[in-house]
Amino acid sequence: MSLCRLLSLCRSDLIESLFMQFFQSNGVELAFIDLMPENGTEKTIILVHGFASTHRINWVDTSWTKRFLDEGFRVVALDNRGHGKSEKLYDPAAYTPAIMADDVIALMDHLGIKRADIMGYSMGARITAVVAYQHPDRVRSALLGGLGIHLVEGNGLPPGIAEALEAPSLDDVTGAVPRMFRAFAERTGSDRLALAACMRGSRQGVTRAEVEAIKVPVHIAVGTKDDIAGDPRALAAIIPGGVAFDIVGRDHNLAVGDRTHKDAVISFLNGRA
């Protein structure tokens, strides 16, 4: 049975148990999956999930992994530090975008991957942008989902999320977005204190000068009903190789697995140098 067929038949938790691996990034144990298409490939995509999510929720459950395999990509996806099956840390200083970008490079080094396309969503898009800026020789192209001009202007997510995660119960949380993240963390069984530390540490911005210096092709996709990400076209305008795509009718959560989003990403990957 082909891997793509297996992915379509098995529950994502079973896929996770079958394919989960671990490696060390500067002493921190991180979980990842590494999926190879049936006939092998020279194309690799690294997937970096968003805040409070996991590789499974962001990429497997939304069928991104299957789509990339169908398109002939080797698919590597990690659980960011503090998330999923990866090690939990409680110091906000351990969660800066630069440190988490180094985790991506460490994973590539661990697997002997010299260069790859890298795709991130929301917080993962911020991490991907940092990788593209700091390690252009390792990035064939960068794909940013759920994050537009708020990459450089503001922090996207509103304040109060860390406090919501630390609150005694959901009943103690006010505000729609903080309540959403608290409820989601409870539903997924996440370590809320580790996520609170991550929220505080990962809110460091990327400067306009750094973004303007990104030399690789960049695809930016944001839902037209996304109130968190900011304008994708405004961000694309300051990146020399940037292009924007509107995920029509989708908010920050639903834009992730949208079919038109997938089609646009594949078209971009097939068309870039």
Image: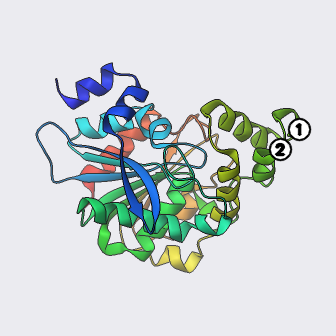
- Whether residue 50 can be seen here: yes
Q: Amino acid at mark 2?
A: Ala
Residue drawn at (45%, 56%) of the image: 29
Residue at the far top: name it: 9
Residue drawn at (59%, 49%) of the image: 51
Residue drawn at (81%, 34%) of the image: 170
Residue 141: quarter of image: bottom left
Residue 231: quarter of image: bottom right
Q: Secondary structure at mark 1?
A: helix
Nearest to the observer: residue 165 or residue 206: 165
* Residue linked to disc 1: 172
Classify 10 Å Cα crowding around label 1: few (below 14), some (14-19), many (20 and above): few
Dots 1 and 2: beta carbons under 8 Å?
Answer: yes
Nearest to the observer: residue 215 or residue 182: 182
Q: Position of residue 206 (x, y in %)?
A: 59, 71
Above or below, comparing residue 7 to residue 238 in the picture: above
Could you tell which of marks 1 and 2 lies nearer the N-terminus? 2
* Residue linked to disc 2: 167
Q: Quadrant of the C terminus?
A: bottom left
Q: Position of residue 116 (x, y in %)?
A: 28, 60
Nearest to the observer: residue 263 or residue 137: 137
Q: Amino acid at mark 1?
A: Asp
Is residue 22 shown left or right of residue 185?
Answer: left
- Whether residue 217 can be seen here: no
Residue 147 disc label:
none
Give the CA separation, mark 1 to mark 2.
6 Å
Q: Position of residue 230 (x, y in %)?
A: 64, 55
Q: Position of residue 167 (x, y in %)?
A: 83, 44
Q: Quadrant of the N terminus?
A: top left
